[in-house]
Image (tube, rainbow, N blue to C red):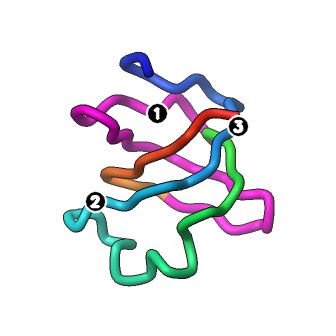
Amino acid sequence: MGSTISTGQKFRIVALHPDDAYYPDRVNILGKHCSAGAQMNNQGPGWYSGEVDCDDGTDYYFFKVGVVLE
């Protein structure tokens, strides 16, 4: 993957870094289908940060989230 994910790009959440504030709730987040609410920036190999809007109506701002583009 590149250094950014463009606004509106669809993906599935596959990982949360232990440093992310949502890590304790990962069992409810992993596997969700979402899109980037704004451009997401690369935070190291496999990790992105930014605003996320999920298909189930939830939204998040992740510090380090791992995704698979759809």
Q: Amino acid at mark 2?
A: His
Q: Quadrant of residue 18?
A: bottom left
Is the residue 22 above or below the residue 47 in the image?
A: below
Q: Which mark is residue 23?
A: none
Q: Is residue 53 magenta?
A: yes
Q: Nearer the viewer, mark 1 or mark 2?
A: 2
Residue named by callout 3? 10
Q: Quick one: 3 or 31, which is closer to the camera?
A: 31
Q: Is residue 42 left or right of residue 19?
A: right
Quadrant in which the N terminus appears = top left
Mark 3: few/some/many CA within 10 Å (<14, 14-19, 20+):
many
Is the residue 34 above or below the residue 39 in the image?
A: below
Residue named by callout 1? 40
Tags 1 and 2 touching, CB below 8 Å: no
N-term-proximal mark, 3 vs 1: 3
Q: CA distance from mark 1 to mark 2?
A: 15 Å
N-term-proximal mark, 3 vs 2: 3
Residue 38 locus on image (x, y percent):
57, 34
